[in-house]
Image (cartoon, rainbow, N blue to C red):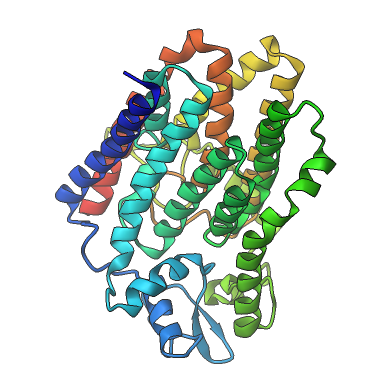
Amino acid sequence: MNTKRSNLIFCVAAGLIAAAVLLIIQSVTGQWFFKAQPYNSYILQAQSWLEGRLDLGQNYEYLELAVYNGKYFVSFPPFPSYLMLPFVALGWDSCDGAIAFASAIAGAVFSYRLASEFINDKKTALLLAALVTVGSNWLFTSLNAWVWFIAQNLAFTFTMAALFYALKSRAGVSFTLWACAVGCRPFQIIYITVILYLLYSAYKKQSANMTILRMIREHILSIIPACCIAVSYMILNYARFGSIIEFGHNYLPEFMRVDTGQFNIEYIKNNFGNLFRLPEVSDGKIVFQSADGFCMFIASPILISFFVYWFVAMIKGTKNERIMLAGVMLLFWVHMISITAHKTMGGSHYGNRYVNDALPAVFVALCFAVQKYSRYRLLNVIPLACGAALNIYWTTTYFKQ
């Protein structure tokens, strides 16, 4: 079987695994992707734009809306509404569920494609793709298109795709996808460093004389689409809130009622502990906390694999391997400390969903390490089995309540 055909088969397999698991859970919980979604802030925002308004025109008490100058606005970054706008213009006001489902499948496919760039054994690449998707807390945020979850779903897919195209020396595509990811989850901005590293490594393979300055000079035009997307965010933010960096969350009533605001170092101590918080035992049953998250290693066991491989690389790896893995580890903790400075770690949910935003960068580092230390690759079956079992069961249980 030729390589291109074999890759296609495994890409389809990655997508089918994700689709099958999601459809099974949807059939049990009724969270079908083709149904209208109850928490549809992005649809309402797209409708308002088409009507010539930046605000929603009224309050929706069941949604998290920013209140500014007596008007109600969607309090989340806007890119998901960009995607929905043409479909809503055509009258498809329930397109968010289908977009979320398509994004989840695409995320699984790009996970496999990225892994296969590092790992020659396609079965191992598929195993790792399953580990970062159905074997992680990604599963919970990919099930439906509720406003909090679809942004994370899209950010995961765009970031994974951006990392893949960086490996393929496609700077313009990579930067554009990264800009889309930032418009879903702003902290994705920190992963530009990983994209730049992968691009530089890819160009270095093509030309031994490549330097960082030469790479920037030769590919400066490739940032134009990403810059246009970023400028659109700034214009929209300024038009709504009078600031190019304010997308609305600071004007949520819950943050305006407290002196410490949305972000404060005072929140870190308690929230950081929630990254490691173990489930409780009540009446002989294990109870997973639904607010502010619990132990990220239980919710996403891929992190266990990442930390183990990182430890091995720090002992056995070359200087360049240690630098690459240490860099991703540093970014991971910068990201974790940043999110723990937020007033909450997410409302009612299963797992520790804020951590999901770091999974694409963790994944690329893990694939890099598995390539170097392939003798341990089958050990990833254990976190995959545990992660899939827990996330399938508790995601189903959560949405059946």
In the rendered image, residue 97, in percent from the top left (x then y), is placed at 29, 61
Which residue corresponds to the image point at 27% horizontal and 32% vertical from the top-left? 284
Q: Is residue 281 left or right of residue 250?
A: left
The quadrant in which the N terminus is found is top left
The quadrant in which the C terminus is found is bottom left
Which residue corresponds to the image point at 60% horizontal and 43% vertical from the top-left? 170
Q: Is residue 144 visible?
A: yes
Q: Nearer the viewer, residue 227 or 63?
A: 227
In the rendered image, residue 252, in percent from the top left (x then y), is placed at 54, 75
Q: Quadrant of residue 322?
A: top right
In the rendered image, residue 173, in percent from the top left (x then y), is placed at 57, 50
Which residue corresponds to the image point at 68% horizontal and 70% vertical from the top-left? 245
Q: Nearer the viewer, residue 318 or 256?
A: 318
Q: Is residue 292 above or below residue 83?
A: above
Q: Is residue 237 above or below residue 178?
A: below
Q: Is residue 160 left or right of residue 140?
A: right
Which residue corresponds to the image point at 57% horizontal and 71% vertical from the top-left? 249
Q: Is residue 77 above or below residue 304?
A: below
In the rendered image, residue 50, in percent from the top left (x then y), is placed at 42, 85
